[in-house]
Image (tube, rainbow, N blue to C red):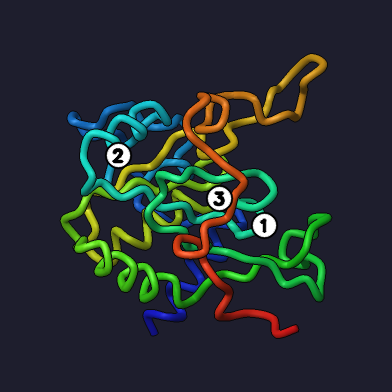
Amino acid sequence: MKKNWLYATLLSGMLGASGAVHANALPHSPSPAPKKENHQIPQGLYVTPQQAYDMVTQDEKVILVDVRTPEEWMFVGYSPLAKIMLPSVMFDYSKMDTHQNLPRYMPVPHANWISEFEEKLADLDGDNESKIIVMCRSASERAAPMANVLHQYGYKNVYLLLGGFEGGTVKDGEKKGFRLVNGWKNANLPWTYNIEADKVYFKKYGVEY
């Protein structure tokens, strides 16, 4: 039952309606909540990329979690400061996205995400009291739903990294559509294309080739 609920939560996040219990920022949140409710998380904790960087470099117990895909890590880049790299959603390259009828491959939620996350967390001597920062591309479709999943499993100290790794898109002008607004990469914080075998995720589910 929980596995089916997790799968539905992940998929609904990709469809733009996570079903999360939304929350404004708590008084001790480093940053205010996003204006859009579907970008808010039940823990009520939000950080900018710079605040996230300060947290993970000043306290080694803070855990930065990157829930993007291996393709994004390899071709767009990732932060070497991420301690858990575990995709919440990957893609089925044998079919198109018929859920949203978008020009992309079919998103496939990682139904075993929470169990694999807790294994990696235990390896870091973390628990449900640990401070966890969740990051995706822009903080909406994947990081926010995953914060909701973690809330359901008792993780209350989860922060949403505002702007994600790539940031938001420019709305007007010559750079319209480019991801140049906020985000970890645009803040010139540490990132790399080089894959570290002892850190990144190796596919264990989904389409067999």
Q: Earlier in the sequence, mark 3 or mark 1?
A: 1
Q: Nearer the viewer, residue 104 or 78?
A: 78
Q: Please, what is the three-letter code of the amino acid marked with disc 2?
A: Val
Q: Nearer the viewer, residue 5 or 199?
A: 199
Image height of 122 relative to 22, above or below: below
Q: Please, what is the three-letter code of the amino acid marked with disc 1?
A: Glu
Residue 42 appears in the picture as rendered:
no
Residue position for label 2: 56
Q: Please, what is the three-letter code of the amino acid marked with disc 3?
A: Glu
Q: Earlier in the sequence, mark 2 or mark 3?
A: 2
Please provide percent x and percent y for residue 33.
37, 32
Seen in the image, is 201 located left or right of residue 168? left
Q: Alpha-carbon distance for marks 2 and 3? A: 23 Å
Image height of 10 relative to 205, above or below: above
Image quarter of the N terminus: bottom left
Residue position for label 1: 71
Give the structural element (helix, strand or loop) at label 1.
Answer: helix
Q: Which mark is residue 79?
A: none
Callout 2–callout 3 Cβ contact below 8 Å:
no
Camera-side mark, 3 or 1: 1
Seen in the image, is 6 located left or right of residue 77? left
Q: Name which quarter of the figure residue 46 lies in.
A: top left
Mark 2 Cα shell of 10 Å, populated few (<14), some (14-19), many (≥20): some
Please provide percent x and percent y for residue 202.
55, 71
Residue 23 appears in the picture as rendered:
yes
Give the structural element (helix, strand or loop) at label 3.
Answer: loop
Please provide percent x and percent y for residue 106.
73, 67
* Residue placed furthest toward the top: 173
Residue position for label 3: 141
Please provide percent x and percent y for residue 90.
62, 66
Mark 3 Cα shell of 10 Å, populated few (<14), some (14-19), many (≥20): many
Callout 1–callout 2 Cβ contact below 8 Å:
no
